[in-house]
Image (spheres, grey):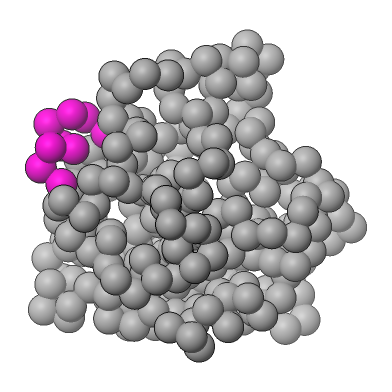
Amino acid sequence: MERCLLNLRVNGWCLVKRVIPTDCVGAIRRAVSETVVTHGNPESLKKGTGFVPGVIAHNQEFAPYLAHPRLMIIARALLGAHVRISFTSAIVNNPGNVRGGWHADWPYNQNNAGHMEAPYPDAVSHLTSLWMLSPFTCENGGTLVQPGSHRSDNNPTGNNGISPDEELPGELQATGSEGDVLVMDSRLWHASAANETTEPRVALAVRYAPWWLNTDVLMPGSDERARLVDEPGATDNVVPGVPKDVFKKLPEDVKPLYRHWVEGRVK
């Protein structure tokens, strides 16, 4: 864990091995793949990816691992004691998808309505984790990362002089085995890579936030979303609420990560 935290602070990312046991990951991969087929965003499919935001509402097979002790050590060390989950998405890179553009994740992506204005402060405010339900390889589109870019006060979505489509010196592909989790400072510049194999690359994107980060702009029906997104006609991610019946069935150590996002909560 000390090595992971050092890598996150210096390079902006680290790999946490075997979060999901090898004998369990296959069943979770199949369940998530089926969920993407049933609930996937049609617009994403046109771009060669399957995407389901708020996938926890449809599939809870991976839920027992969301509060894994090693992940919580990292999240609490960087974000404080009161950590919560802000995004839970299913992402499938289908064969033939093309390389994506460099970006930093919400709230640093300058294309989102709810974002920290660049230049933003040099502080960790959000963590992105990519759960490898398939192996991440150079051939199937393991995520591209630009080590050290998390210390920049802007990213290629903010007209910082670097084209999002540009290949950068020092860029790496993050690779790992099924069941591993790639953890990134959400400021880190990263991009999807082309899947040049005949098999889909299946993953979950789970993001962790501190208690003080206002995520209400992501919640359908919230006042923050109406003010920042709907009324001005802007765009941002949508994270559906967790149904009450789903929340009640979550593991006890996972419930605190979602209690702020249960459907019907006070806005």
Q: Residue 246: within the magenta?
A: yes
The image shows residue 188, relative to residue 45, as above or below, that is below
Q: Residue furthest front?
A: 81
Residue at figure coordinates x 75%, y 67% from the top left: 151
Residue 150, quarter of the rendered image: bottom right
**In terms of secondary structure, what is the magenta stretch mainly?**
helix
Q: Position of residue 31 (x, y in %)?
A: 15, 55
Q: Residue furthest right?
A: 161
The image shows residue 133, relative to residue 61, as above or below, that is below
Q: Residue furthest bottom?
A: 3
Q: Quadrant of the N terminus?
A: bottom left
Give the magenta-colored segment's residue range.
242-250
Left or right placement of residue 146 versus residue 248 in this view = right
Front position in the image: 196 or 263: 263
Q: Position of residue 224 (x, y in %)?
A: 56, 21
The image shows residue 205, relative to residue 223, as above or below, that is below
Q: Position of residue 107 (x, y in %)?
A: 62, 45
Residue at figure coordinates x 72%, y 83% from the top left: 170
Whether residue 249 is visible to the viewer of this picture, yes or no, is: yes
Residue 162, quarter of the rendered image: bottom right
Front position in the image: 123 or 7: 123
Residue at figure coordinates x 50%, y 88% from the top left: 3
Residue 12, quarter of the rendered image: bottom right
Left or right placement of residue 41 versus residue 188 in this view = left
Q: Position of residue 69 (x, y in %)?
A: 29, 71
Whether residue 137 is visible to the viewer of this picture, yes or no, is: no
Residue at figure coordinates x 76%, y 75% from the top left: 168
Q: Quadrant of the C terminus?
A: top left
Q: Residue 97: within the magenta?
A: no
**Number of numbered tags placed on the structure image:** 0
